[in-house]
Amino acid sequence: MYLDILDFQANKSLATEKLDTLIRNEEILRDYLLGRRNDISKIENHIFFFDDIKRTDKVIADADPHTFFRHSSFGYTVICNDFNGYYVISNLSGILICTILEKSSIENWENTYVNVDKGKFKVKNQKVKSPVMGDIIDYMNESRKAQEQLSKEQQEKILKAIQNNPQKLINSEIYKNKLLDRNLREN
């Protein structure tokens, strides 16, 4: 978030009130982490563990969610303008961490809340309905389009590696997740 704020400031790409919201929340989190305060105000942290999806809508299924979430790592600041939500999200190969700086009116995170005062966390029946997921779906689609635009040379290298050792591909986690994505699209 700190680096995103610096980028927003340098590029003047964010309205002043939105930038002020990010700066205010970054200061709260910084002060908490440095031990200068005992709470994080109304900021919430959530962890969502990406599990096998059995059913979903076509938009999500077409974005290869198993492959995307389990084989990527990323993080960035998200502002959902239509719902006035502010977030910092990170995906760590299937563990989605979301810090909600300012909640939108349609936020619903079930069994994902991380209580900063308690050291235990139980995971079961997690569900998320949040405008930040729309941004993540857009990112998933961008990733899939980038994969489809591999150069002929790179495609040939991949094909040759598969031909040289097909069992390696069949035993790989990425292959298993590609199969889960294919099954999801077909259901």
Image (spheres, rainbow, N blue to C red):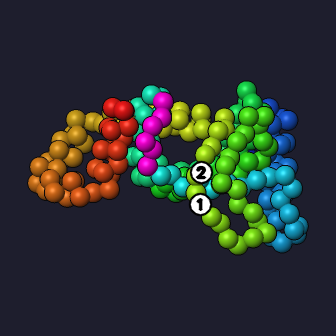
Mainly helix, strand or loop, the magenta region? loop
The residue type indicated by label 2 comes to Gln
Q: Residue furthest front?
A: 125
Depicted 127 relative to depicted 105: above or below: below
Residue 32: image location, x then y, percent: 82, 65
Q: Is residue 149 visible?
A: no
Q: Mark 1 sits on what residue? A: 123
Residue 18 quadrant: top right
Residue at 47 percent across and 56 percent down: it is: 93
Q: Is residue 24 visible?
A: yes
Depicted 83 relative to depicted 71: above or below: above
**In the image, 87: left or right of 51?**
right
Pick the quarter of the image with the C terminus.
Answer: top left
The residue type indicated by label 1 comes to Val
Residue at 76 percent across and 37 percent down: it is: 104
Residue 89: image location, x then y, percent: 63, 49
**In the image, 154: left or right of 107?**
left
Residue 83: image location, x then y, percent: 75, 30
Residue 136 quadrant: top right
On whether residue 169 falls in the magenta region, the answer is no
Q: Are marks 1 and 2 in contact (CB under 8 Å)?
A: yes
Depicted 58 relative to depicted 123: above or below: above
Residue 179 quadrant: top left
Depicted 60 relative to depicted 124: above or below: above
Q: Start and end of the magenta stretch? A: 52-57
Disc 1 crowd, CA 10 A, few/some/many (<14, 14-19, 20+): few
* Numbered circle sitting on residue 126: 2
On whether residue 56 falls in the magenta region, the answer is yes
